[in-house]
Image (tube, grey):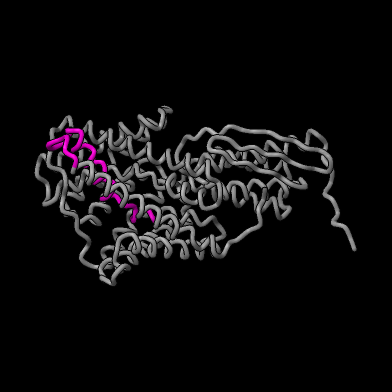
Amino acid sequence: MTETPLKQQFSPEALRDIVDLALWTGQLLLQHGANASRTEETVHHLGTGLGCDWLDVLISPDAVVITTTSHEEFRTKARRVVRFGGVDMAVVAAVSELSYQVSAGELDRFETRARLKEIGKRPLNYPRPLLILLVGLACAAFSKLFGGDWPVFAATWLAASSGMAVRLWLRQRNFNFVPQVVITAFVAGLLASLATLLSWGSQPQIALVASVLLLVPGVPLVNAFHDLLSSHDITGLARGVHGGMISLGIAVGLSLALAVTGIQSLWPTFATPPTLAEDALWAGIAALGFGVLFNVPRRALWGAVLCGAVGHGVRYGLLASGWGSLGTVEVASFVGGTAVGFLGLLLARRLHTPRILFTVPGIIPMIPGTFAFGTMLGVLQAAGIVGAGGSDPFLLQAGLNAVKTGLVLGALAIGTVLPTLLFERQRPVV
């Protein structure tokens, strides 16, 4: 019986260097939108690929803690993770690719450090004017998914693009995420209110709903469910709270906009596109805009668009079918999310890249914006900010819409991660 040969023994300085590289890897992933299990796995593979016998990795909401083992030497170190700069799928993909190269023995620790430095300094894949226009277009596509006409489409595009420009300006000046969200929602809501004040289109209130969807906390909420399902409970709960704070910031920004404009009648009559082809088209455009917002690499952007069109198309078909429980929005969203999950897994294997590049932009068009807006509207009505306030039915309706929002989000998140839970079972890395 032969024993497994031990890896080479490192000097204390070399072991410290590997710890720093592993921490740097985890920091980049958490800062730019990776979930806890992907971060844990990638950090472990990179550390063992650089020659450590083992790594114990602890992921918390705002820190990474690593213990490395090399023969009889141990090193434990923590690094605080400060989230800034937004979701960047290109960084997540580049770091994941780097870990595979290190695991295959293609890079040593000096080359790894140089690559991490280069990844951290990469510019965005898309120029700022294009980013602003496409994010605005994505929100305008949402207005078509909600049944808006072309004047509402134009108003939404203008309001959302302006809001995105303000958001980028605030981010560049390192504003905290809460005022970023509130001010962006205020600007977008104020401009979208013009559609109602000037009676643009048949349902101008739809512009108010669609214009603030550029702020939708899709990544934190999806990661929250994924972390909870993978037993990273504290991190999952923290991300859920973060998503809730973003939603609250949107509500505050809209309230300020409505207080300025004095608009009282808000609830539009939502509708769906008349055909499956139109539904898939607008959903794909929405996924395109959010793919650009999340800095999905150009070579993978078409996959994000495809996931958005297919997932929303599947949900549209089920909702239109009237097949009992399959025709409910919760079940249809689960099936649509599952379709995105499987398609994202296939694309990830084909393109050798993380599947979140496809699945996260792909499910954004199915985010329950109408129910979330109903929740915020009910709270605003109960508070007397719009309409006749102080009535219990408003709070009841807000509560029902909040439950509906949570159920649909949960269905989307579980459906999206279901293929991973079924077909990518891996041994623990801690």
Q: Residue at x 40, y 43 (%)?
A: 127
Q: Main secondary structure of the magenta part?
A: helix
Residue 362 locus on image (x, y percent) = 40, 57
- Residue 196 vs 315, above or below: the answer is above
Q: Residue 92, image x and y in percent?
A: 54, 47
Identify which residue is drawn at 50% across, 42% down: 32
Tell me: 356 left or right of 162: right
Q: Is residue 33 left or right of residue 208?
A: right
Q: Please give left or right for residue 68 compared with residue 36 in the image.
A: right
Q: Is residue 157 visible?
A: no
Residue plotted at (38% across, 36% down): 245
How far from the left and from the top, in percent, is residue 121? 55, 37
View extreme (front): residue = 392
Observer-nearest of 272 and 247: 247
Q: Viewer-proximal residue, 245 or 295?
A: 245
Residue 216 shows up from this direction? yes
In the image, 376 versus 32, the foreground residue is 376
Say which residue appears at 55% left-offset and 56% top-offset: 353
Assess whether residue 368 is covered by the magenta stretch.
yes
Q: Residue furthest right?
A: 1
Q: Quadrant of residue 167?
A: top left
Q: What residue range appears in magenta?
A: 363-392
Q: Is residue 120 magenta?
A: no
Percent position (x, y) of residue 30? Answer: 54, 41
- Report whether 236 appears left or right of 320: right
